[in-house]
Structure formats: C-alpha cells, structure tokens
Amino acid sequence: MADQPKYNPLTASTFFDDGRSARPLVVGTVPRGSLAEDNLNVPKDADTFPVPVTRELLARGRERFNIYCSVCHGLLGDGNGMVPRRGFRQPPSYHIDRLREAPVGHFYDVITNSFGAMPDYAAQVPPRDRWAIIAYIRALQFSQHAPLAELPAEDRARLGAGGPR
Amino acid sequence: MAQIFHPSTNTISRVSLFSVLFLIALLLWLLAEFQRSSYITEANVEREQPVQFSHKHHVADDGIDCRYCHTSVETSAFAGIPPTKTCMNCHSQIFRDSPYLEPVRESFRTGKPVEWTRVHQLADFVYFDHSIHVNKGVGCATCHGRVDEMPLIRQVASLQMEWCLDCHREPELYLRPHDQVFDMAWQPPSDQLEQGSRLAKLYKIRSVEELTSCSTCHR
C-alpha cells in the first residue's frame, strides 16, 4: 500500500525507452485547452493588448515579473539583476527609447521565443501571465518616464520642494 | 510456622510491583519516541545528489524565488522539479565550465533527465496537495524549514500523520498573509492566534472535523 504500482510524478519508468514516465509532447500536437488561448499569441508587430489591462492584471504581472525576470533585469527593469552581476550578459535597461517605443508584440515574442542571449520563458510562464508581465513592464517604463504634467498636484509639489522622492 | 519473609520485604514487593508497571510504561514511551525519531522518519538526512545543487546559494545568495524552479507549486499537487532547461537558463553562461555542472550539461546535450534523489516521500496511500496549502497561507518554511540555509536539502518535519494532524486541528497557529508564503524569514507576530483566526475566516478554511476526517487524506 505504501508503494503502489502506479507512477508518481516524474518517477522513472522501465516501460519507455528513455526511462521517463512523464511523456514529452508529440511534435506537432496542440495541448488540450491551449486553442482557447490562441488569441493571446500575437504577431511581433502587434501593438494592442489582447486582454483587458486591469489593476489585477498589473498586480499579477508585478508578482510574475519579480519571480521570473527580476533575477536578470532587476526589480526596476534597469538590467541590474543578481545574475548579470555573477557574469551573465547584461540585459539592456527597459528605460531606453528603443524599448519604450517597441510594440507589445515584441515583448511577447522575446518571452516566448527567446532573444539573443536571453533564454525563452515559454515553459515557465503561461500566455496570460506573459501579458500580465508586459503590462507591468509598461507600468515600469512609465514610472521612470512620466511627464511632469501628468503627476498629481501633490507629487508635483513634493518634487518642486526637492523632498524625498 | 515461622515466617519465611521478614516484614520489611513487603515494601520491596510493593516497590517491585510498581517498578514493573513503570518499566512497561517506560518501554512503551521509548517505543513511541523511537517511532517518531529521525531514525524512522529519515528527517534531517541529507541525500547524495547527482549535482551538488545548493538552495543556500540559489535562494539566499542570488534571491531566486521558489516558483522560478518549482513552477507548479501554486497550481497542482506536485511542486515540480525543474527540467534541465531551467538550469541552463543561467548556466549556459555562468559557471559554464564548472565540473560540478557537467551532469547538467550532459543532460542538456543528450536529452536524458538528471536523476535527482527524492528527499520527501509520503506513502502512496496518503493524498497530499501543495496548491491548497500554498494558496491558503501555509508557508513553504512551515513544512520544509529554512530551505535558504540548506546547502543540501533535508527533510525537517517527520511527515507522519501526527504532524499533519497537529496543524489540521489548529491551522490558525500557522497561517500567514498571502504575500508572505514564499518568504523564508517570516516569523509569526506576537498576536498570531488572532491574526491566524482572521486569516482562517478570510481564506474560508473548513472545520476541524472536515480537515481531520480520514477521507481528507486517505482517499
């Protein structure tokens, strides 16, 4: 009873040649359920979010960004994460004009298909979470590049006084 | 007839009667303690692994979140052990020549998985699910201890039925806010009982009867 003749997750198998009980996807198959999310897969140059951008989405994006991206890109998105400090190639800051102007489809493509030295995150981050992360990156970019006129009066006064930011 | 035993032997016989009872109790207690000891539960045993993977380095020194590697811990029963690709996300560039990582590189080249040795293993007749615990505010450290201080992972709790029940009877002693679940250093506040009861209501934790019913864990 304590050791039943069944596969627990990831246990070794003597039945399959490669010894894996967890079978890899057969090439060319579509996992059940993923068709429903197909509208989330946009072309590289698309510049609209396929999901409504809400406060919840941003909160989710912030959480996911901090888990999967901040180790390299830093919590601020400036590229000063822990891993580049240990010798990984330094990623560009998100706060450069090229990336501020890049369409959201580009970000989706980078996460899904990798980009240069950056590995892809398709296996770790499901499509909806990718969009949450992108929404949060846009918020990060705005946070470092907000026009003075759009700040609430209170914050503008604080800035003018030269107080703590 | 002359008395064979001197009256003082009465005391001796009484004492020995009691000490037999005491000895039996002692034996039972020793047996129970032995049953709970790490010799039986295999707690605190560090396993030989194919790669000297250190949680201390990756979690404490590099600040990597548990979910970066144990991706399914919030959504499924199984916490998930990272595939080789996850290691190569970083180790394709850093420590790429380290001899300690040769098994990982070889696995990546050949597609043959790294064979980790399990550390925690419940009997198959017990049903356990990570997602409900994590989503209802039970922190990793409550069950797995300070993983961020372990160069090699070891089991901290006994994983015996008694241990599960201790918490299922009084979950409010252990519950924490959602955003603290992955925090290794979290300490219960001084008014934990109050905070915990509030969280238990908020998370809609079921009654003790349900949580300790046999069929919750043996199904």
Image: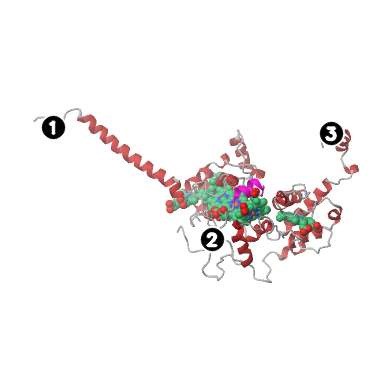
**Residues at discs 2 and 1 both on one chain:** no
Chain of the residue where label 3 is placed in the rendered structure: A
Q: Horizontal and vertical percent for residue B126? A: 50, 54
Element type at marker 3?
loop
Q: Farthest residue toward the right? A: A149
Instruction: Give the spatial CA distance, label 1 vs label 3.
Output: 101 Å
Q: Is residue B62 magenta?
A: yes
Name the amino acid, label 3: Gly
Chain of the residue where label 1 is placed in the rendered structure: B
Residue A64 in sight in this render? no
The residue positioned 77% from the left and 48% from the top of the image is A55
Provide the residue designation for mark 2: A8
Q: Farthest residue toward the top? A: B7
Give the prevailing secondary structure in the magenta stretch. Answer: helix
Element type at marker 2?
loop
Mark 3 Cα shell of 10 Å, populated few (<14), some (14-19), many (≥20): few
The mark that comes first in sequence, 2 or 3, is: 2
Name the amino acid, label 1: Ile
Instruction: Give the spatial CA distance, label 2 vs label 3.
Output: 58 Å
Which of the 4 image quarters holds residue B93?
bottom right
Residue mark closest to the camera, 1 vs 3:
3
Chain of the residue where label 2 is placed in the rendered structure: A
The residue positioned 60% from the left and 58% from the top of the image is B99
Mark 2 Cα shell of 10 Å, populated few (<14), some (14-19), many (≥20): few
Mark 1 Cα shell of 10 Å, populated few (<14), some (14-19), many (≥20): few
Provide the residue designation for mark 3: A163
| Region rendered in magenta | B54-64
Element type at marker 1?
loop
Provide the residue designation for mark 1: B4
